[in-house]
Amino acid sequence: MEDTSFTESQDRPATAPPPREAWRRKMRDDVLDAARAMAAERGWDSVSLSQVASRAEVSRPTVYKEFGSRGGLSQALDVGVVRVGSDAITVTAGGLDGGEKESVDTAVRQGTERLKDVLAGRTPPASPTA
């Protein structure tokens, strides 16, 4: 006869995060989406954490607890932009042959690290070349 009993770990798929972690991820995404939209609408300098919290429907202390400061939220937005750009280039490079793909992968990795340093204020931005 087949055993139809369930243990607690069988009730929920192994990949599902605990409810608190799922809420935190959703809250973080909601805050980042709100901040991104508000910055696009009126510029980052005109956006306050209170306004972001209100639009994301969370409290201001929740935003501070998650990001630490306005600068921390700004860095999280910057990292998201870097990730999206890097992913887009990686997908585009997928059709290249081995040597070309390796060159693109190296350039993306080095460019991503440089951009992180610039965003963190550790390196001055490069001047555009003509």
Image: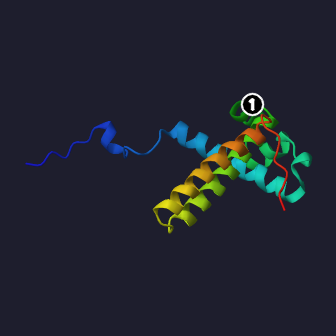
Left or right of 26, for residue 45: right
124 and 76: which is toward the camera: 124
Which image quadrant for residue 28? top right
Left or right of 1, for residue 91: right
Q: How is the image coloured?
A: rainbow
Crowding at dot 1, Cα within 10 Å, few <14 / some 14-19 / many 20+, comes out as: few
Question: In the displayed image of the protein, which residue is found farthest to the right?
Answer: 46
61 and 79: which is toward the camera: 79
| Residue 42 x, y percent position in the rendering | 90, 56
Identity, as a three-letter code, of the amino acid under mark 1: Gly
Relative to 56, say whether 122 is above or below.
above
* Residue that appears at 71% across and 30% down: 65
Q: Which residue is mark 1?
A: 68
Regarding residue 86, the answer to whether it shows in the image is yes
* Residue that appears at 75% across and 36% down: 72
95 and 21: which is toward the camera: 95
Secondary structure state at the residue bearing disc 1: loop
Relative to 13, say whether 42 is above or below.
below
| Residue 86 x, y percent position in the rendering | 62, 54
| Residue 18 x, y percent position in the rendering | 47, 38
**Figure quadrant of the C terminus:** bottom right
Question: In the displayed image of the protein, which residue is found farthest to the left?
Answer: 1
Left or right of 48, for residue 63: left
* Residue that appears at 51% across and 40% down: 19
* Residue that appears at 74% across and 30% down: 68
Regarding residue 76, the answer to whether it shows in the image is no
| Residue 92 x, y percent position in the rendering | 57, 66
